[in-house]
Amino acid sequence: MLKGLDPLLGPDLLRVLRAMGHGDEIAIVDGNYPAETDGHRLIRMDGHDAVSVANAILSVMPLDEMVPDAAFRPGIAGAPGRREPIFAEFEALVARHEPGKRIAQLDGPAFYERVRAAFAIVATSERRLYGNLVLRKGVIHPAPERQIENESQSLDNLH
């Protein structure tokens, strides 16, 4: 356990999140998704739902602000206007962690292609259909100079 980190962020997931660069994407998929087939970097989080895993990831990873859309969910085959309850839960998470960002809908093959191209796939035990989300990593901006000076002085005081 570490201070300030969601306990769902285990060593494998933290390593992947840290290794990702700006613009890399991570897919969080439900229990029905063929994650073993599609994932070249696969993190299994059996026993956890997609919303909790997305919340943990968004607690430490910024979304890309350089593109119009940095979060994606699947559309529903044959019913593109239908909304599953899990979509509202994903939207609430994004709104809380990344105000002003929205989740774009990708239909059919476009969503699956995006998941297959992701830097990593996190396989959850989410039982709800369409419980999948792709997140594009943004950047952490440098702290202002004054804050850096104060942090350096605080560190010097520890010695």
Image (cartoon, rainbow, N blue to C red):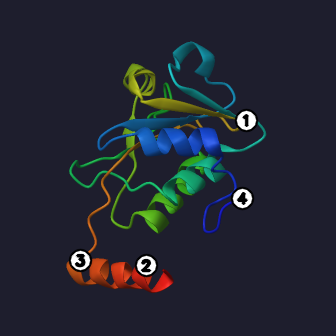
Looking at the image, tell me whether mark 2 or mark 1 is earlier in sequence order.
Answer: 1
Q: Seen in the image, is 108 located left or right of residue 24? A: right
Estimate the x, y position of residue 132 in percent, counting from the top left: 55, 37
Q: Amino acid type of disc 2?
A: Leu
Residue 85: percent from the left, percent from the top?
61, 50
How many residues crowd around disc 1 within 10 Å: few (fewer than 14), some, or many (20 or more)?
Answer: some
Q: Amino acid at mark 4?
A: Met
**Would you say 41 lies left or right of 143 here?**
right
Compared to 33, does 73 lie above or below? below
Q: Out of 135 and 5, give the one closest to the viewer.
A: 5
Q: Which mark is residue 144?
A: 3
Q: Earlier in the sequence, mark 4 or mark 1?
A: 4
Q: Residue furthest top?
A: 37
- Kindly state the secondary structure of the residue where label 1 is placed: loop
Mark with earlier residue (3, 4): 4
Q: CA distance from mark 3 to mark 2?
A: 17 Å
What residue sits right under mark 4 in the picture? 1
* Residue at 70% over, 38% down: 126
Instruction: Tell me the residue that label 2 is attached to.
Output: 155
Q: Are marks 3 and 2 in contact (CB under 8 Å)?
A: no
Cα separation, mark 2 vs mark 1, equals 43 Å
Q: Nearer the viewer, mark 3 or mark 2?
A: 2
Within-10-Å neighbours for mark 3: few <14, some 14–19, many 20+: few
Which kind of residue does numbered mark 3 sit on?
Pro
The Cα–Cα distance between marks 4 and 2, rounded to whole angstroms, is 23 Å
- Nearer the viewer's eye, disc 4 or disc 2? 2
